[in-house]
Amino acid sequence: MTSPFTPKTLSFLRSLTRHNNRDWFRERKPQYEQHVRGPMIALLARLARDLPAFAPELVSDPRVSLYRIYRDTRFSGDKQPLKTHIGARFPAQGFARNEGAGLYLEIAPGWVWIGGGLYMPSPADLRAIREHIAAHHRSLRRIVTAPAFRRAVGELDGERLARVPLGYARDHPAAEYLRFKQFLAGCEFEADLAVRGRFYAQVLTIFRAVAPLVRFLNAPLLAERRGVTQTTLRTDRAPTRDRRPAARRRGAPAPTW
């Protein structure tokens, strides 16, 4: 697939960085729609067709995935009104907005970031994930040491504690993973990747590699919401796609935002 983004995408984002005000943007909003938002929507449409092959539980829909250009400055010291990048998140079905792990893509004037994970889990979600890691650490190790994962994103990343959290032995076999407070896996590229022919193939390669981690992280969170015990969880396989007509499916999960 030829990338839907063009040099005009990056040019617009660079100009927006220099002229970050609503009046400037309002006059040029048609250019934003044509060169930035429109191409991202085209990318989401293509991913909506390709994600089900390896991550059928993830959502690629502009109404869910696409971040707004306007910043929420109410509680920020940075009062610039507009984001100078365009980003999209691919969450799992069954979560409220901004909950759970997902895949993520960002295009900025100076970089492209492709990956996923869980950036800011709540204390309750972090506890559930740590319990899941303690019980299923071999599965997590297989995921983050798989050759495809290593080639695509390197190692599991994110902020972590200096020591194993309270309640777990210092020599726990999952000690290195229990220390994580964030669970991130991705790769940063030069911005011009977004306009190259290999862009979409690179997105798919990384998303395929990171999707098992996203599934592992979401398993205990979905289980809590559904009242499932840790001992019944299976996180090593993608969910089986139900190929019956939609009208005949029972209990099919749907986005809640």
Image (cartoon, rainbow, N blue to C red):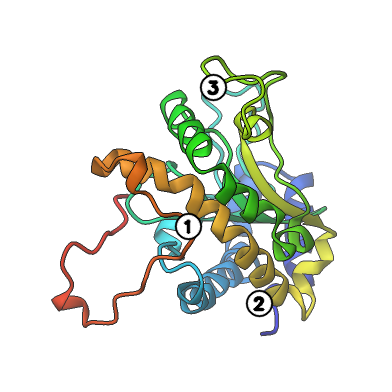
Sequence-earlier tag: 1 or 3:
1
Residue at image mark 1: 65
Q: Position of residue 27 (x, y in %)?
A: 61, 56
Picture residue at 62% right of the left edge, 62% below the top = 32
Image quadrant in which you'd find residue 73: top right
Q: What quarter of the picture does the N terminus occupy? A: bottom right
Q: Residues within 10 Å of mark 3 (few under 14, many from 20)?
A: few
* Disc 2 secondary structure class: loop
Q: Nearer the viewer, residue 173 or 101?
A: 173
Separation of marks 1 and 3 at Cα, in angstroms: 23 Å
Is 190 situated above or below 243?
Answer: above
Q: Position of residue 144 (x, y in %)?
A: 67, 52
* Amino acid residing under circle 1: Ser
Image quadrant in which you'd find residue 240: bottom left
Residue at image mark 3: 75
Residue 139 visible within the image: yes
* Disc 3 secondary structure class: loop
Residue at image mark 2: 4
* Amino acid residing under circle 2: Pro
Asked if residue 249 lies left or right of residue 21, the reply is: left
* Amino acid residing under circle 3: Phe
Nearest-to-viewer mark from 1 and 3: 1
